[in-house]
């Protein structure tokens, strides 16, 4: 006698749940790796931008020193407000202004100025891809703050220490990232 079973072949509920769990784990791993990779690339992009902004400030100060040497002007006279006197004095440099002196011989305060309190956040000119402190339709605020200090107290006629600090925060809940570079320049 042959018995026929009325059961149809198929997956049980438990087998389906196990299959879904395995599939979920197989998809989640690569997605997490991709998310970490994107986060690391954003952080690296911001860090590289911060390094370039710090280097730009140092190069600007070197340019002022070299220009002063050529014209016979006191070597860091435009940075009187930036010079450290023990009070934590800081200044900002807007490198979009190549002319750091006005026609009347005074310092161009658009290019070099003392920060009252903390320095302003840098903006980006989206039309020309230039960082600075400009305003207008093309200028968008960024996440970067740059402060400059010059310490020539040890040997004011021959040596100065430039300190450039860049601060930024990549995301809403990430900690503020800060680094400072120091450059020793000489009056030679």
Image (cartoon, rainbow, N blue to C red):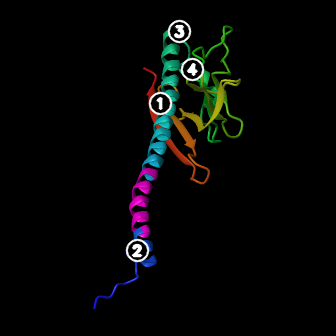
Which structural element holds mark 3? helix
Marks 3 and 2: which is nearer the front? 2
Query: From the viewer's perspective, is the residue at label 1 or at label 4 nearer?
Result: 4
* Residue that numbered label 1 is attached to: 55
Would residue 19 appear left or right of 88 to someone viewing this image?
left
Q: Position of residue 60 (x, y in %)?
A: 52, 23
Give the side of residue 30 with respect to residue 126, left or right: left
Residue position marked by numbered label 3 in the rendering: 71
Magenta-colored span:
20-35
Q: For the residue labelled by badge 2, is the local secondary structure a helix, a strand or a loop?
A: loop
Q: Earlier in the sequence, mark 3 or mark 2?
A: 2
**How far apart are the alpha carbons under marks 1 and 2?**
64 Å
Q: Earlier in the sequence, mark 3 or mark 1?
A: 1
Q: Residues under labels 4 and 2: Cα distance?
A: 62 Å
Q: Work out whether 107 lies above or below 183.
A: above
Q: Cβ–Cβ below 8 Å for labels 1 and 2?
A: no
What crowding class fits label 1: few (fewer than 14 Cα within 10 Å), some (14-19), or many (20 or more)? some
- Could you say which is closer to the camera, residue 151 or residue 178? 178
Of badges 3 and 1, the one in the foreground is 1
Residue placed farthest to the front in the image?
Answer: 1
Give the labeled residue for mark 2.
11
Q: Quadrant of the N terminus?
A: bottom left
Q: Is residue 16 visible?
A: yes
- Which residue position holds label 4? 128
Find numbered disc 4 in the image and state the secondary structure of the residue it sits on: loop
């Amino acid at each position: 006698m042959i018995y026929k079973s009325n059961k149809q072949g198929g997956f049980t509920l438990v087998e389906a749940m196990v299959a879904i769990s395995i599939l979920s784990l197989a998809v989640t791993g690569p997605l997490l790796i991709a998310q970490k990779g994107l986060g690391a690339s954003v952080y690296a992009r911001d860090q590289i931008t911060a390094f370039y902004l710090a280097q730009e400030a140092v190069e600007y100060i070197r340019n002022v020193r070299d220009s002063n040497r050529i014209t016979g002007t006191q070597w860091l006279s435009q940075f009187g407000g930036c010079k450290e006197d023990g009070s934590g004095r800081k200044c900002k440099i807007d490198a979009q202004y190549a002319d750091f002196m006005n026609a009347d011989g005074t310092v161009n305060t658009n290019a070099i100025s003392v920060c009252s309190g903390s320095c302003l956040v840098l903006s980006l000119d989206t039309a020309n891809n230039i960082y600075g402190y400009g305003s207008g339709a093309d200028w968008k605020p960024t996440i970067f703050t740059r402060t400059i200090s010059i310490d020539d107290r040890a040997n004011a006629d021959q040596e100065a220490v430039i300190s450039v600090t860049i601060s930024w925060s990549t995301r809403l809940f990430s900690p503020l990232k800060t680094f400072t570079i120091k450059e020793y320049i000489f009056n030679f």
